[in-house]
Amino acid sequence: MKQLNLLMIVICLLLTACGSQQNKSQAGETSITETKAAREEGGGEDNTKQNAKKLQVIPVQNIKTPKPLVKKSQKIIKTADVRFQVKNLSKSIAKIQAMIRKYSGYVSSAKQERQYSQIQSNITIRVESDKFEDLLDDILKEGIYLDHKNVKARDVTEEFVDIQTRLKTKRAVEKRYLEILEKAKTIEEILKVENQLRVIREEIEAKEGRLKFLVDQINYSTIRLVIYQKTEAAEAPSPGFLSKMGKGFKAGWQGILSFIINLTYAWPSLLVIGGGIFFGIRYWRRKIARKA
């Protein structure tokens, strides 16, 4: 019996020892798991910080107009239409003019006008094509509110090459006509050749004019700028005393003229009425004379 009790005690001690060992093992695993999780969280925070450094927000004023990738053989015409509001129109115009001089550009046209609640200035700027984007970015910094910005790059390479080819052909034809003109003997032949020369030279001049226009548009880009400043609505000035008096005399004279003109239109009616009055008075007098 004692041996059985001793055996039961030994078994209980063994079970207790195994349970405590298992709890220690689970606790160790839990601590290891928590440590790994903490490391992963720490690593996640580091990654988030690194990503935040990489994905910094770019301010609006730092956004630049992208330059198109242009090959040397390409012929590109660049234009921009921009409208924005400024704080002070006079100061902004002075700053923009300084920018234009800085980039060796020029103003091809300018117009300023006052509207109901704003002063507006329309400016057309020409600048070398390689300085177009830089000047445009500097000009946009003057605005406090951008209404619209429309930038275009038109490829005219095909038209440019076509005109050059046609010019070369027409000049060869012109040279041929000149050779024929030298060999012409009769007046009729000379007149025919000269007429053909006139036609071909007109075509050459037209093509040369178009080519010069394209070259100018390619070399110098165009910025059509509209800037405006908000103002209080101006009341119309009231007329003075002398102005009112002058208008009164003018209105009175116009009234007299209108009355005379109306009389000329109404003369038949006046004639009938006058005749009726005349004969009525005459009849009345005769009647009185008879009674007397």
Image: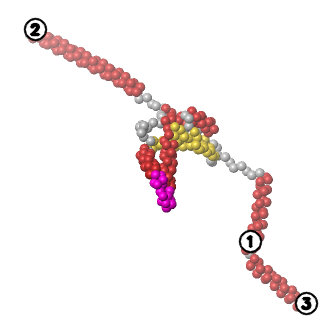
Instruction: Give the prevailing secondary structure in the magenta stretch.
Output: helix
Left or right for 25, reference 84: left
Residue in the picture at 56% in, 43% down: 124
User: Which circle's residue, 2 or 3, is located before the other in the chain?
Assistant: 2
Residues packed near mark 2 inside 10 Å, few (<14), some (14 to 19) or many (20 plus): few
User: Which circle's residue, 2 or 1, is located before the other in the chain?
Assistant: 2
| Looking at the image, residue 270 lies above or below residue 209 | below
Where disc 3 sits, the SS reads loop
User: Which residue is disc 2 drawn over?
Assistant: 2
Of the numbered discs in the image, which one, if any, rests on residue 262? 1
User: Which residue is disc 3 drawn over?
Assistant: 292
Residues packed near mark 1 inside 10 Å, few (<14), some (14 to 19) or many (20 plus): few
The range drawn in magenta is 177-195
Residue 282 screen position, x and y as percent: 84, 85
Residue 269 screen position, x and y as percent: 74, 78
Q: Nearer the viewer, mark 3 or mark 1?
A: 1
